[in-house]
Amino acid sequence: MSKSQSKGGAVQVDGILYDWHLQREPHLSDDEGWRGMTISLQQRDARREALVEFPPPKRLMKGLPPGRLQLDDATISRCVRAALSAGWEPETRGKPVVFMVDSEGN
């Protein structure tokens, strides 16, 4: 039996619920080379979205088969905290804000 990878869900951080979904898998861009996985975060019932981009997995740059990070609640929670500490204001209006994190979501 294979283990399916989650492509979305919800986490609770400091008593607030945040929805997330996989926006983009790691891929090779013609302009920028390897791009990492991107997830979308949104506070439940809020307006402004945050896009969190991970670095490309080293395995892709070494020519190994594609794969992506395992997304668990702890990683998503670290992404939410990193975006909030970097200035994401989910209650405001506007375009989605893009943040870069490390492979652990910090």
Image (cartoon, rainbow, N blue to C red):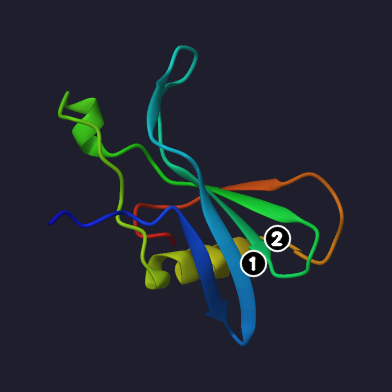
Instruction: Give, as a three-letter code, the residue at label 2.
Output: Trp
Task: Decide if residue 36 is on the left or right side of residue 97.
Answer: left
Query: Is label 2 in contact with label 1 (beta carbons under 8 Å)?
Result: yes
Q: Report helix, strand or loop for mark 1.
A: helix
Instruction: Give, as a three-letter code, the residue at label 1.
Output: Leu
Task: Decide if residue 84 is on the left or right side of residue 5.
Answer: right
Q: Residue 52 at x, y = what percent?
A: 54, 50
Rendered image: mark on residue 88: 2
**In the foreground, 5 or 58:** 5
Split into 4 quadrants, where in the image is the N terminus? bottom left
Quick one: label 2, few (<14), some, or many (20+) residues within 10 Å?
A: some
Q: Report helix, strand or loop for mark 2.
A: loop
Spot the residue most to the top.
30
Q: From mark 2 to mark 1, how far is it between C-alphas? A: 5 Å
Q: Residue at x 53, y 53 (%)?
A: 21
Q: Residue at x 69, y 68 (%)?
A: 43
Q: Residue at x 17, y 27 (%)?
A: 62
Task: Kindly identify which residue carries mark 1.
Answer: 84
Spot the residue most to the right.
93
Split into 4 quadrants, where in the image is the C terminus? bottom left
Q: Residue 28 at x, y = what percent?
A: 38, 21
Task: Decide if residue 80 is on the left or right side of residue 5.
Answer: right
Quick one: label 1, few (<14), some, or many (20+) residues within 10 Å?
A: some
